[in-house]
Image: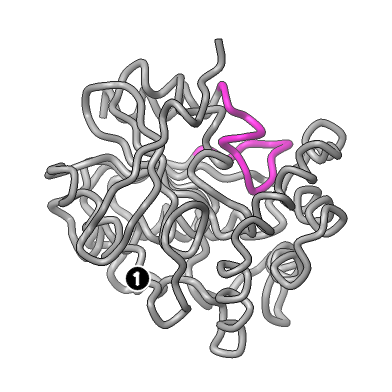
């Protein structure tokens, strides 16, 4: 029987935020951090991974401030690293593995440079890494995928969600279904304050938590697994090549026929990779 998010949902109060978390399993703690899309949550990003990972670990899929059922946050309040540390402190967790998609991967990278004693393993899927020079990415600002993402924040209609999902994945026929696009639209529109805060932050630049400092990447000492889709149209895969060259104890899995959502498009392989990496590295 598939897991029901209502059975896993838990409210966690930190010193600064009230956060929603979806929790399952036992053992070494693994924190799953979602991306920045409208309607993104811990559950929507990781529904296909929580059950498999919870067979081996104590899994927490968190809605970060400004997303999902967690507190709203303006762009000036966004510090997801501080929020993640507050989450660990509230639950009495000394050290956890962090698994982050896109914005969540960026948060995990920063956490590994700023709080190395709180992270045991680092796994990223398509994290943006500031304004690094690129060979394959667009040179006129945000990528094709980020431009569509921003438009979906301005108008979270099912049609714009369809455009967004089609950019995020390789296999559009399988994943960009009317049901999924309607569900993403409904989830985004259910929290209009999150949409307003994101759009209000656009004049100040991408309304995301602070970028990781590239010069600090070589200081990351924890085992690091980089997973990236070769067909990612949001964050080009050369970003993970750059991380691979700069993080000493890192390895890269580049997946063909895969866009920005490796954990969704290749869930079974993703679950095997992450389980083996955390359990045996």
- Residue drawn at (76%, 55%) of the image: 164
Q: Horizontal placement of 117 versus 37: left or right?
A: left
Of 55 and 238, the residue lying toward us = 55
Q: Where is residue 37 in the image (x, y as percent from the top left)?
A: 62, 58
Callout 1 environment at 10 Å: few (<14), some (14 to 19), or many (20+)? Answer: some
Instruction: Count the numbered circles shown.
Output: 1
Is 267 magenta? The answer is: yes
- Residue drawn at (56%, 42%) of the image: 45
Locate the C terminus and report the quarter of the image it occupies.
top left
Relative height, residue 75 to residue 44 (above, below):
below
Is 196 magenta? The answer is: no
Q: Where is residue 259 in the image (x, y as percent from the top left)?
A: 69, 45
Which residue is identified by label 1? 79
Which image quarter: residue 194?
bottom right
Q: Horizontal placement of 253 versus 190: left or right?
A: left
Q: Horizontal placement of 170 versus 204: left or right?
A: right
Q: In this picture, which residue range is highlighted in magenta?
A: 253-268
Furthest-top residue in this view? 1
Q: Position of residue 133 (x, y in %)?
A: 57, 76
- Residue drawn at (58%, 51%) of the image: 40
Relative height, residue 198 to residue 257 (above, below):
below
Which image quarter: residue 217?
bottom left
- Residue drawn at (73%, 82%) of the image: 140
Disc 1 secondary structure class: loop
Locate the N terminus and report the quarter of the image it occupies.
top right
């Amino acid at each position: 029987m598939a897991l029901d998010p209502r059975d896993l949902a838990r409210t966690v109060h930190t010193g600064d935020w009230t956060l929603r978390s979806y929790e399952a399993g036992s053992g070494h703690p693994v924190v799953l951090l979602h991306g920045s899309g409208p309607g993104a949550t811990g559950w929507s990003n990781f529904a296909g991974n929580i059950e498999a990972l919870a067979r081996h670990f104590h899994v927490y899929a968190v809605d970060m401030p400004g997303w999902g059922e967690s507190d709203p946050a303006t762009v000036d309040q966004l510090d997801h690293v501080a929020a993640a540390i507050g989450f660990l402190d509230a639950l009495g967790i000394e050290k956890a593995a962090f698994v982050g998609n896109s914005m969540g991967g960026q948060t995990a990278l920063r956490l590994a440079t700023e709080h190395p004693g709180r992270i045991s393993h680092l796994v990223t899927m398509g994290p943006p890494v500031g304004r690094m020079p690129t060979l394959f990415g667009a040179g006129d600002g945000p990528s094709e995928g980020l431009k569509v993402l921003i438009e979906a924040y301005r108008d979270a209609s099912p049609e714009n969600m369809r455009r967004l999902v089609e950019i995020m994945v390789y296999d559009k026929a399988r994943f960009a279904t009317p049901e999924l696009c309607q569900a993403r639209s409904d989830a985004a529109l259910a929290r209009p304050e999150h949409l307003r805060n994101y759009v209000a932050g656009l004049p100040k630049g991408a309304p995301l938590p602070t970028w990781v400092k590239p010069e600090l990447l070589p200081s990351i000492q924890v085992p690091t697994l980089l997973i990236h889709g070769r067909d990612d149209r949001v964050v080009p895969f050369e970003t993970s090549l750059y991380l691979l060259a700069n993080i000493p104890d890192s390895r890269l899995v580049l997946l063909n026929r895969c866009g920005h959502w490796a954990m969704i498009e290749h869930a079974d392989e993703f679950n095997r990779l992450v389980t083996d990496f955390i359990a045996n590295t």
